[in-house]
Image: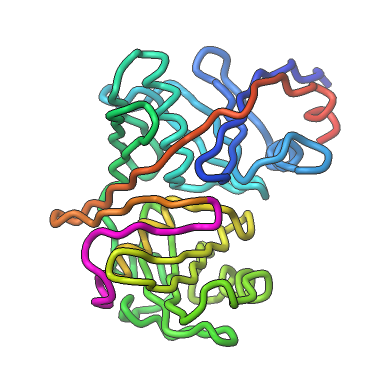
């Protein structure tokens, strides 16, 4: 068996939602689920919420293709914080204020005005039950599922499935108990990201997120998008609001054409080399 080669990586994060980023544009990187899990392990690996591999774009309009692996090794279709991180990296390489990131969910258009905050067009929100997807026909404005105090969520697909529960006190919810139960609920054949949202005012929402295949994270961009859409559909806010997550604040806008725009910061923590022994053991 051939021993894996050392792999350079960069650690990045958006509001604490952290990523190990591997550049596979020149040397293709193929990792098994077990190897992805080994890298993401916070005790014996590098540690991250998601593993990101950058590849050459499939679409000629895109700058890069972004592959997203959850901490459990599963593939994720969308990740807003990761998209902002990769957009910032591409803009730095190209000395540009604009980038197009390709994912399996489509093209994401990103820009920056100051090199500190990055805005990304996360595409349209999908609201039909078949698009979430749900296991049966249902009004996505009022999903008929419950776990303890969590009931009557809104279903939204932002390239990946979300269920948004509106509560009186988001910080009082035991997400470690209810998150995994709802993530794996039979209504969601592809599992779901679970959000608990507290509307503080017409312009501010407090949000905690249990991410599918990861657990509770400090921030989730696609969940913030889904929550903005859900809050407006429930007539709880206008089309724009600051969404306050554990790790900080994202500014969200649900545009009249149905697309959702997210603005927030990104950061690079450090770079290094993945020891081949870590991957060989996996």
Please, which colouring scheme is shown?
Answer: rainbow
Which of the 4 image quarters holds residue 216?
bottom right
Q: Residue 208 in the image: state x and y as whole percent.
A: 52, 64
| Quadrant into which the N terminus falls | top right
Quadrant holding the C terminus: top right
The answer to whether 149 is drawn above or below residue 166 in the figure is below
Residue displayed at 74% across by 23% down:
274
Q: Is residue 41 left or right of residue 214?
A: right
Residue 278 as seen in the image, left or right of residue 165: right
Quadrant position of residue 111? top left
Residue 188, compared with residue 22, is above or below; it is: below
In the image, is residue 212 above or below residue 100?
below
Magenta stretch, residue numbers = 232-247
Q: In percent of the image, x 28 and y 25: which residue is there?
A: 98
Residue located farthest toward the left when viewing the structure as drawn: 256
In front of the other: 280 or 80: 80
Any magenta on residue 104?
A: no
**Residue 10, position as x, y percentages in the image:** 61, 25
How many numbered discs?
Answer: 0
Where is residue 39 shown, x and y percent of the image?
72, 36
How far across and down, in percent of the image, does residue 128 sit?
Answer: 28, 68
Residue at (40, 38) in percent of width and height? 103
Along the line of sight, which residue is nearer the eye, 97 or 67? 97
Q: Quadrant of residue 53?
A: top right
């Amino acid at each position: 068996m051939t021993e894996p080669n050392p792999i350079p990586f960069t650690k990045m994060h958006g509001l604490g939602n952290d990523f190990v980023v591997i550049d596979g544009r020149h040397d293709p990187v193929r990792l098994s689920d077990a190897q992805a899990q080994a890298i993401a392990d916070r005790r014996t690996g590098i540690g991250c919420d998601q593993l990101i591999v950058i590849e050459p774009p499939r679409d000629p309009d895109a700058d890069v293709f972004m592959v997203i692996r959850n901490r459990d090794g599963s593939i994720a279709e969308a990740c807003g914080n990761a998209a902002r991180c990769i957009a910032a990296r591409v803009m730095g390489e190209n000395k540009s204020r604009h980038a197009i990131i390709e994912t399996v969910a489509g093209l994401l258009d990103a820009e920056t005005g100051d090199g500190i905050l990055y805005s990304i067009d996360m595409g349209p929100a999908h609201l039909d039950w078949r698009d979430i997807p749900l296991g049966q026909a249902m009004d996505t404005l009022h999903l008929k599922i419950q776990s303890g105090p969590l009931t009557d969520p809104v279903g939204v697909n932002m390239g990946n499935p979300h269920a948004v529960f509106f509560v009186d006190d988001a910080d009082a919810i035991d997400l470690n108990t209810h998150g995994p139960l709802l993530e794996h609920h039979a209504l969601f054949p592809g599992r779901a990201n679970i959000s608990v949202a507290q509307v503080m005012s017409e312009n501010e929402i407090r949000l905690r997120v249990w991410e599918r295949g990861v657990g509770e994270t400090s921030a989730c961009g696609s969940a913030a998008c889904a929550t903005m859409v859900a809050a407006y559909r429930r007539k709880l806010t206008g089309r724009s609001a600051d969404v306050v997550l554990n790790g900080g604040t994202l500014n969200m806008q649900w545009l009249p054409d149905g697309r959702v725009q997210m603005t927030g910061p990104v950061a690079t923590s450090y770079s290094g080399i993945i020891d081949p022994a870590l991957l060989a053991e996996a």
